[in-house]
Amino acid sequence: MNKRKSNNYRDYRNKLRAWIHQGQDPNRRPFYQCQQHLNSTSGTSGNSTIRLATLNATGLFHKEGETSGKISELASLLYEAEQNDKIIHVLAIQETFAPTDAHSVCIEGYTWYGRHRTKRHVDSKCSGGIGLLVHNSLLVGTSSSIEQDCILGGCEGYQKLTLMRNRKRITIFNVYHELDRVDYKIKHTEFHRQLFNRIKISVTADGDDPNKLTCVLGDFNTRLGIIQDRPDLAAMS
């Protein structure tokens, strides 16, 4: 496992636990928070706050299909958040390493929507894979649809979940921009074009309607600017 990615996972876990137990500084929240009345039937007494987080897990499963300790760790963190009245309603996960779609992330109180990577060498370790953990309070009285069978520019890291209740709608994109692999090349420009077209269609449909919201979560494997923050790599020119 990439040591840097492992550290990123650990850092996020620690930030989330610190936020759960130490406070709600809006500048240090390890997630996106919005006001949407989609969860008005939940046990939060009509609280309209929806919290959405994203996490590159670098492996929830081993090659043999066995679960790693990270699933139970995530379950514990999400339980702690709920007990402290800080429910994480949606957790978008990248790099699950799930061997098949049948390998589900089972966490009490949540529904799992998973997509495994099909394009990988037979001898390779489990890689890629994405999924959404959705708190069941968002699903009560809600119609849901998931789009996750399309391939954008050769990339399988795409999910679009739509939840509707009456006139209210929230659309959640979970994106993992895969890097090139020896046997599988990504058409990166095509991936971006198709992805942004889908996002644009959703945002345009939202318009100025406060009852409609589009959120984009994920790992884009990209950066803004030209500064290289890794000392082991040369600065970008």
Image (spheres, rainbow, N blue to C red):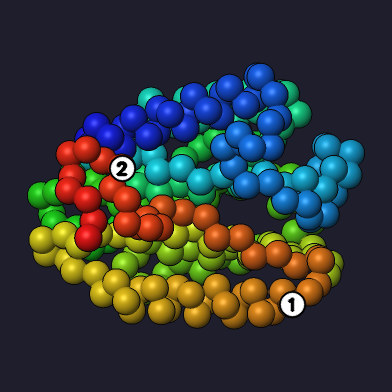
Element carrying mark 2? loop
Q: Position of residue 14 (x, y in %)?
A: 49, 24
Label 2, on which residue?
Answer: 229
Query: In which quadrant is the C terminus drawn?
Result: bottom left
Q: Is residue 38 left or right of residue 110?
A: right
Q: Nearer the viewer, residue 99 or 130?
A: 130
Three-letter amino acid code at the position of disc 1: Gly
Q: Position of residue 42 (x, y in %)?
A: 81, 43
Query: In which quadrant is the N terminus drawn?
Result: top left
Q: Nearer the viewer, residue 5 or 57?
A: 5
Identify the residue at the far top of this view. 21
Which residue corresponds to the image point at 74% horizontal and 77% vertical from the top-left? 207
**Which corner quadrant of the image does residue 68 belong to?**
top left
Label 1, on which residue?
Answer: 207
Q: Is residue 226 left or right of residue 215?
A: left
Q: Is residue 102 visible?
A: no
Element carrying mark 1? loop
Q: Position of residue 108 (x, y in %)?
A: 60, 33
Q: In 3D space, how far apart are the residues under numbered discs 2 and 1 (Cα atoms)?
A: 37 Å
Which residue corresponds to the image point at 29% horizontal and 72% vertical from the top-left? 188
Q: Is residue 230 visible?
A: yes
Q: Is residue 90 left or right of residue 65?
A: right
Three-letter amino acid code at the position of disc 2: Asp
Q: Nearer the viewer, residue 235 or 73?
A: 235
Q: Residues within 10 Å of mark 1 (few under 14, many from 20)?
A: few
Which residue corresponds to the image point at 47% horizontal and 32% vertical from the top-left? 12
